C-alpha cells in the first residue's frame, strides 16, 4: 500500500500537547465502481499481523467483519469463514483455493488486514497504539479495489513538574498500561475510521456513501 499517508508513531515528546487529528490514507479504484461487491469474506490475517500482535488477530478480523456489515449485503466473518473452509477442504492462504472458495460460495471478494500495535510505558506516560492496513480485492485475480490505513492512539499520564505530579502521573500511566480494554477499543477505533472511506454498496444505499469523486487521499477519522 505504498504511497498512502501514515500517521506518526511512537510516544510524543510532549505528552501534554494535543494529539493531531486522526486521518485515514485511502484509495478506491475505478474497478470498485465498475462492479461493486455484493459479498465479501474476511480473510485470515495471521501472516500479515506483527508477531507480537498475533494474539489480537481474531479481534481485528471480527472488528473488520462488523464494519463490513455496514457496507455490504453479505459478509462472511472469520468464524463462518473457518467453518466453510474446513467443510470445503480449502486453504484460504492459497490463491487457487481462494478462487475455488469464490466459485463454491458465490462470494467473489475478500478483505485482508495487516495489523500491529502495543503499549509503551515510560513511567510517567503510557501510550497505546494500533495500526491497521486494510484492502479489498477480487478473489479471482487479486485486483485491489479499495485500501486504507489508519493508526489509533491513546495515552495517559502527565508531565513531572513537581513531586506530587510525578506520583499522580506515574499512577495514571501504570493504571492505563494495565487496562486490558484499551487495545480492543483501539482496534475498533482504527478499523471503524478506516472503513469511513469505503463506500456503502448495500442494496438501496448506493450513492449515499462516498461519491466517485472521493477516490484517493486523506479523510478525517470520525
Image (cartoon, grey):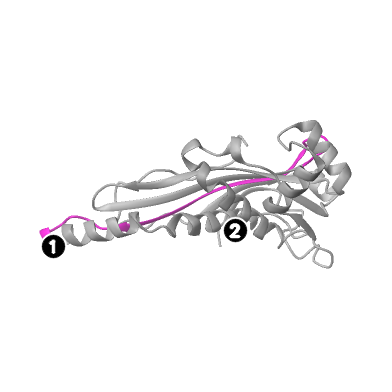
Query: Is residue 134 or residue 59 the one in the foreground?
Result: 59
Q: In which quarter of the image is the N terminus?
A: top right
Left or right of 207 in this view: 20: left
Whether residue 3 is visible: no
Q: Quadrant of residue 16?
A: bottom left
Is residue 218 rendered magenta in the image? no
**Span highlighted in magenta in the image:** 138-164
Q: In which quarter of the image is the C terminus?
A: bottom right
Q: Mark 2 — residue?
A: 192
Where residue 20 sits: x, y (%)? 43, 54
When the figure is inspected, residue 43 is found, relative to residue 173, above or below; the finding is: above
Q: Mark 1 — residue?
A: 164
The residue sitting at 28% across, 56% down in the picture is 174
Where residue 219 sits: x, y (%)? 59, 54
The residue sitting at 24% across, 49% down in the picture is 123
| Kind of element beneath mark 1 | helix
When the figure is inspected, residue 62 is found, relative to residue 204, above or below; the finding is: above
Left or right of 102 in this view: 129: left
Where residue 77 sits: x, y (%)? 70, 54
Query: Is residue 120 or residue 82 the one in the foreground?
Result: 82
The residue sitting at 38% across, 59% down in the picture is 179
Is residue 161 rendered magenta in the image? yes
Left or right of 169 in this view: 212: right
Amino acid at each position: 500500500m505504498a504511497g498512502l499517508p501514515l500517521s506518526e508513531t511512537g510516544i510524543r515528546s510532549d505528552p501534554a500537547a494535543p494529539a493531531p487529528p486522526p486521518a485515514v490514507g485511502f484509495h478506491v479504484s475505478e474497478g470498485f465502481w465498475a462492479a461493486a461487491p455484493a459479498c465479501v469474506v474476511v480473510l485470515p490475517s495471521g501472516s500479515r499481523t506483527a508477531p507480537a500482535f498475533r494474539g489480537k488477530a481474531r479481534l481485528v478480523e471480527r472488528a473488520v467483519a462488523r464494519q463490513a456489515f455496514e457496507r455490504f449485503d453479505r459478509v462472511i466473518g472469520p468464524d463462518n469463514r473457518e467453518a466453510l473452509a474446513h467443510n470445503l477442504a480449502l486453504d484460504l492462504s492459497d490463491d487457487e483455493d481462494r478462487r475455488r472458495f469464490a466459485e463454491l460460495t458465490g462470494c467473489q471478494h475478500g478483505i485482508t488486514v495487516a495489523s500491529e500495535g502495543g503499549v509503551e510505558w515510560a513511567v510517567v506516560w503510557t501510550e497505546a497504539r494500533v495500526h491497521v492496513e486494510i484492502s479489498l480485492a477480487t478473489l479471482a485475480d487479486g485486483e485491489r479495489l479499495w485500501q486504507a490505513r489508519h493508526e489509533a492512539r491513546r495515552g495517559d499520564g502527565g508531565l513531572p513538574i513537581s513531586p506530587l505530579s510525578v506520583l499522580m502521573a506515574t499512577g495514571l500511566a501504570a493504571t492505563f498500561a494495565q487496562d486490558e480494554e484499551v487495545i480492543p477499543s483501539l482496534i475498533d477505533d482504527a478499523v471503524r475510521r478506516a472503513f469511513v472511506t469505503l463506500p456503502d454498496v448495500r442494496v438501496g444505499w448506493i450513492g449515499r456513501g462516498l461519491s466517485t469523486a472521493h477516490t484517493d487521499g486523506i479523510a478525517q477519522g470520525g
